[in-house]
Every structure is written in structure tokens, then in C-alpha cells.
Image: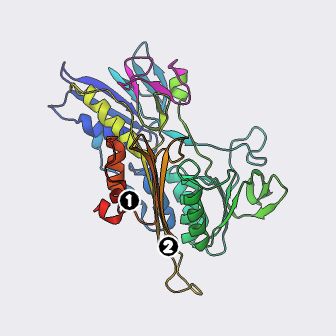
């Protein structure tokens, strides 16, 4: 390492951490020497594609990210940050010194407080109960679902993750029940009309959906070889469902343990400023663990933008600060599964996209275009002649033009043109 190079240590081998390492570069001409500590032993992968692996559409290797080479230490977990000594201590006894430290620790799946989830003083989930966050989760679910036929699966949580998991299991042939505590599916992204269309589409995949229902606990039975196996799900109203498989898709929580132990400021996530610095200016945070301007995004797009912005700063470029990301959510839900007894010409895939503020405020203008026959729905929210949000289902040819108008925040001149197919071409 030359005297001009700075030592950058990145904790987290996911999308954000590896994007940062790639942008900073390596080799003799690089201004930085980068080490990435990746807790998972797998080849780095794109978490966004895990539902496609679970559905059987992709093999796990298809999700692989570009190989970062020797900069990544796989299967190594950071256990402590010594800010005074500028050193990261790892679970294998090794240490890494840094000039700049980047926390890209991501997030963990939320495990709800269900009766029967854990035994007293235990932290092992019963057999058949899975989160859906990592490649290990995905592979375990795939093995548990098997060919899917006859497997009774209950997915708890009707957000983006729960809908994706339910669709994937249904495509494998499992008998799927989706339980959502809220009034509708994907409440954070979709309005009532769009959610109703999504509900109808999932029903065509033979997914049984329960909204406004709270899961109270799990029932389990002892295994002859020891341990417990899930046998059912109990709802607050006393209704019980038999289950061979339970998926916990109740959201995610930023991983902030290292930051808290190091004395950094943490609210929901690790608090960062416009230069993505924590309360210690030598330590930065990006991706799902970072909280910027009071917001934790939890999406791939903002994580990549934060990595790019931080790379420019650490690389010595005169770059503007990070001011936030206008995030667009997209999802493709598969067609109804084919097989014996399936109706020919059944419903095809359903694409959806949502961006910005989809719930209007008093005084906002709302424009909707719906076609029940084509199963398409478009809604945009306009405030002071500017596009502030929208929802599209079934036909996304206009999403690019609408998203550009939303990102630019320029006064609208021809909204109808943007909403039609011609507007997106």
C-alpha cells in the first residue's frame, strides 16, 4: 500500500458493500485499498432474485453478483469495532485496521412475538418455520417445499416480501395461505384499488388470502429425533390452520448492533448525514442499515445510489452530497400454475410498479385509468401541477416516462400523454 492510499474496510458483502468496492477499484493506481468482510459463506448474490429461485425459475447461481476477487473475505463476521484504535475485530480472531470504515450490514428479518415460536430461553425456530431473507433461508425453504404438491404453507405478512414468497410457493405447487394483519396487501406501496387487483390475481394462483387477521401463535409437535416441528397456525379469533410450512415475512429491521456497541448514533437505522457519515466522521453507513434524513429505504436502488455517492467521496472526487433517493418499487407476479386440471389460457403474469406518494393529500388531483378486461390500472397523484406519485398494474409501458417526470419534478404539460401507451414509447 502506497502512502497515498487509504485503507477502507467495508462490513457487509451484499449489494451495497460490493458496489462500493467495485466503484473504489483496486490495483496499483487505486487511491484506496479495500477489504470487504462478508458474513455469508456463499458467492455474493442479488437478494432481489431470491423469490425467483424459490419459485424454481432461476438456479441459485443465476443470482451471483460479479466476483470481487480477493477484496472479499467470505464467511467472516465482524464482532467489534474499536474506534480509538480504528480496528475491526472478527469472529475468526483476525483484525482489520481502517482509515475509513463503511457499515453495510443490511437488515434482519423481523421475527414476530408469536406463542410457540421459541421455547423458553431458546432461540431455535421449529422445523418448518422459516424467515425469507438470505440465500440460506431460500435454500431451506426450497428443500422444505420440495415438489410442492400437497405441502400446506402459511405465509405471515402481506407486504412485498410476503406476496413474493406466497407467489413463489404457489408456483411450486404448494397449497398457500397468505395472512395479512392489515386491511390490504402491500399497504405501503399500493392504494385500495390496486391492492384489490393484486388480491384478485393472487387468488387466480390458488392462494387463499386472509386480511385483517392477526396470527397469535404456532402449534408444534415433538419429533422422534428431538426438537419440534410446526403443525399449525392459530389466529387471534381462535381459527386454526394446519401447516407443514410457515414463512415469516413480517418485514425487516436494520442491523445496528455493531454501531450501537461502538457508541454511534442509532435511531431506526444508523444515522448518517449528506456525506453518509455517522456520528464518527471516519465511519460511514450505506444500504439497508443506514438512516438518512429520517428515512431507512430498505430497497436496492437507494443502496446502490448511496454506494456510488460514497465511492465518489472516498475516491477523492469533488462530488455533491447524497440528498436522498426517489425509489421505485417493481414486482412481477407469475402466471397461474399449469398442470392437470388447469384451465387453458389462464391469467398470465401481473406486473406492478409504485413510486412516490400514492395516497393523495387534501387538494391533490388524482387521475385513474382502469381496464377490468385487460386487468390494467393506472393512478397518478398530482400536486401543484407536478407528479408526486403513482401506481401501475398490468401494463407498465408508461412507467419509464412517468418515473422520469416524477424524478425531474417539472411542471406537467400533457399528463394524458404520459398515461397512455404512446407516452411510454
Q: Nearer the viewer, residue 85 or 166?
A: 166
Residue 179: image location, x then y, percent: 68, 57
Q: Secondary structure at mark 2?
A: loop
What is the number of the mark on residue 36?
A: none
> Circle 2 is placed at which residue position?
335
> Circle 1 is placed at which residue position?
419
Crowd band around label 2 with a 10 angstrom C-alpha radius: few (<14), some (14–19), many (20+)? some
Ranked by sequence position, the earlier of labels 2 and 1 is 2
Q: Is residue 121 left or right of residue 410?
A: right
Q: Is residue 232 left or right of residue 82?
A: right
63 magenta-colored? no
Q: CA distance from mark 2 to mark 1?
A: 25 Å
Residue 110: image location, x then y, percent: 62, 43
Task: Tell me the magenta residue range.
Answer: 261-285
Q: Nearer the viewer, residue 178 or 327?
A: 327
Residue 342: image location, x then y, percent: 57, 84
Please tell me whether residue 124 is drawn above or below residue 17 in the rendered image: below
Point 38% across, 50% down: residue? 43
On the question of residue 71 being in view, the answer is no
Specify the quadrant that holds the C terminus.
bottom left
Q: Nearer the viewer, residue 399 or 8?
A: 399
Crowd band around label 1 with a 10 angstrom C-alpha radius: few (<14), some (14–19), many (20+)? many
Q: Is residue 220 left or right of residue 2?
A: right
Amino acid at each position: 500500500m502506497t502512502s497515498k492510499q487509504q485503507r477502507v474496510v467495508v462490513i457487509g458483502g451484499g449489494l451495497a458493500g460490493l458496489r462500493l468496492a467495485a466503484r473504489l477499484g483496486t490495483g496499483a493506481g487505486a487511491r484506496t485499498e479495500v477489504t470487504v468482510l462478508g458474513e455469508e459463506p456463499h458467492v455474493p448474490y442479488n437478494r432481489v432474485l431470491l423469490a425467483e429461485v424459490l419459485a424454481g425459475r432461476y438456479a441459485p447461481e443465476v443470482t451471483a453478483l460479479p466476483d470481487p476477487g480477493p477484496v472479499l473475505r467470505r464467511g467472516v463476521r465482524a464482532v467489534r469495532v474499536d474506534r480509538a484504535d480504528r480496528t475491526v475485530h472478527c469472529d475468526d480472531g483476525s483484525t482489520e485496521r481502517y482509515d475509513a470504515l463503511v457499515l453495510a450490514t443490511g437488515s434482519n428479518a423481523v421475527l414476530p412475538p408469536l406463542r410457540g415460536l421459541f421455547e423458553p430461553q431458546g432461540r431455535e425456530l421449529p422445523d418448518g418455520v422459516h424467515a425469507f431473507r438470505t440465500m440460506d433461508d431460500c435454500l431451506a425453504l426450497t428443500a422444505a417445499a420440495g415438489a410442492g404438491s400437497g405441502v400446506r404453507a402459511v405465509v405471515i405478512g402481506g407486504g412485498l416480501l410476503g406476496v413474493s414468497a406466497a407467489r413463489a410457493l404457489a408456483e411450486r405447487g404448494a397449497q398457500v395461505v397468505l395472512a395479512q394483519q392489515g386491511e390490504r396487501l402491500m399497504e405501503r406501496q399500493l392504494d385500495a384499488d390496486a391492492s384489490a387487483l393484486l388480491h384478485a390475481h393472487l387468488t387466480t394462483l390458488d392462494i387463499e388470502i386472509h386480511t385483517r387477521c392477526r396470527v397469535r401463535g404456532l402449534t408444534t409437535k415433538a419429533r422422534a429425533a428431538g426438537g419440534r416441528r410446526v403443525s399449525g397456525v392459530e389466529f387471534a379469533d381462535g381459527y386454526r390452520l394446519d401447516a407443514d410450512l410457515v414463512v415469516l415475512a413480517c418485514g425487516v429491521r436494520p442491523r445496528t448492533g455493531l454501531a450501537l456497541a461502538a457508541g454511534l448514533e442509532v435511531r431506526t437505522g444508523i444515522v448518517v448525514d449528506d456525506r453518509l457519515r455517522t456520528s464518527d466522521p471516519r465511519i460511514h453507513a450505506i444500504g439497508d442499515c443506514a438512516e438518512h434524513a429520517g428515512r431507512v429505504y430498505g430497497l436496492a436502488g437507494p443502496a446502490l445510489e448511496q454506494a456510488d455517492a460514497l465511492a465518489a467521496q472516498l475516491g477523492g472526487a469533488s462530488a455533491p452530497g447524497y440528498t436522498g433517493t426517489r425509489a421505485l418499487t417493481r414486482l412481477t407476479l407469475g402466471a397461474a400454475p399449469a398442470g392437470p386440471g388447469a384451465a387453458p389460457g389462464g391469467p398470465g403474469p401481473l406486473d406492478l410498479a409504485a413510486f412516490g406518494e400514492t395516497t393523495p393529500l387534501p387538494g391533490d388531483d388524482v387521475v385513474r385509468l382502469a381496464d377490468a378486461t385487460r386487468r390494467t390500472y393506472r393512478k397518478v397523484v398530482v400536486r401543484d401541477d407536478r407528479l408526486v406519485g403513482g401506481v401501475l398494474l398490468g401494463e407498465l409501458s408508461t412507467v419509464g416516462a412517468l418515473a422520469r417526470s416524477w424524478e425531474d419534478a417539472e411542471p406537467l404539460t400533457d399528463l394524458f400523454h404520459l398515461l397512455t401507451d404512446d407516452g411510454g414509447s
